[in-house]
Image (tube, rainbow, N blue to C red):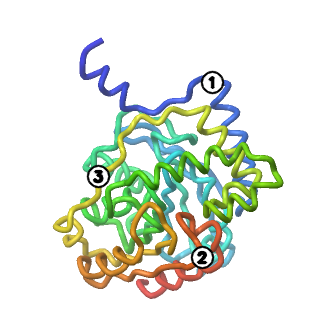
Amino acid sequence: MPETAARTQADVGRYVSDAWRERCFTACDAVYALGAPPLSEEDVETSFGTTHVYRYGPANQAARSRTPVVLVHGAGSCSAMWYPNTPALSEDRPVYAIDTPGDPGRSVQREPIHQPEHAAQWLDETLAGLGLGRVHLVGSSYGGWLALNQAHRRPGRLASVTLLDPGGLEKVGLRFFVWIFASLFATFAPKAFRPRLAAWLEQPVLVVPELRTMIRTAVRAYRIRRPAPLPLSEEELSTIRTPLYLVLGKRSLLVHPQRQAERVPRLVPGARAEIISSTGHGPQIDHAEETNRRMLDFMASVD
């Protein structure tokens, strides 16, 4: 096999088998069922593979004309993770939830997208394929890096960017990886111990059976083949002119919340940064009502 082809193959995520892929889809569907029912699903062809997208929408005719929201999930997950958010967001405006290629979901990756310019090109092609000229982009964790990268490199379609405890601001430290592995091991704990572990680890996955099953199945079913993204430099952050809203968990282990809440508005003109107490890395899950309200208020202020 030529070197280029071998390198490309090594950088492309994949399911370990057809059977495990179907098991993962079943587990994801159980989580989707906890949120708003999608109006439709579609596949968008890009230079990097097929991107699967779920579309949600308001019943109110006036709300349908508002600037849509595009949701980009975190690493090792799929767009089912937005189940606590799709009901409130899609009641207010159209919503598109994207399965990122390279993560366990229904997208099919053919080329790597971990390089920043490729990531921005992939997302721009996806938005273009959906016919979206102006969107409120929301990213969580790794999806936060994708959103931040988009604001830096391809901001033309962005009305605003909301970052939920995002990557892209600091180098991912050991403490975050320890938390990830501890959380994964905790999914195997007896049911009686899970609420206490969930509180200790700030990990809502442990107390939502469908979410716990989805995460455990995805780990078995899918092989992610990309390096952790590098944070944007201060020079890169300072180029961003898209209205930006940063939401951090007070006990986040991915970033240092107070440091970034002070740093980002200093570097990005007009950026808003807020810290939600009593949460860690998943404010949109364990503080969904509050996070949904804050996001919608910010989008309304931009519109």
Q: Nearer the viewer, residue 159 or 119?
A: 119
Q: Classify residue 159 by image quadrant.
A: bottom left
How would you rate the neighbour count of disc 1 (Cα within 10 Å): few for under 14, some for 14-19, many for 20 or more?
few
Measured as percent of width and height from the top left, residue 268 is found at 26, 77
- State how far apart marks 3 and 1 are (Cα): 32 Å
Q: Classify residue 3 by image quadrant.
A: top left
Q: Is residue 179 left or right of residue 30?
A: left
Which residue is located at x 58 percent, y 71 percent? 279
Q: Classify residue 232 by image quadrant.
A: bottom left
Q: Quadrant of the C terminus?
A: bottom left
Question: Residue flagged by tag 2: what amino acid is it?
Answer: Ser
How would you rate the neighbour count of disc 2 (Cα within 10 Å): few for under 14, some for 14-19, many for 20 or more?
some
Q: Tell me the residue that label 2 is attached to.
A: 278
Q: Is residue 23 left or right of residue 190?
A: left
Q: Earlier in the sequence, mark 3 or mark 1?
A: 1
Question: Residue flagged by tag 1: what amino acid is it?
Answer: Asp
Q: Tell me the residue that label 1 is attached to.
A: 18
Image height check: is 112 above or below 120?
A: above
Badge 2 vs badge 1, beta-carbon distance below 8 Å: no
- State how far apart marks 2 and 3 are (Cα): 28 Å
Image height check: is 133 above or below 179?
A: below
Q: Nearer the viewer, mark 3 or mark 1?
A: 3
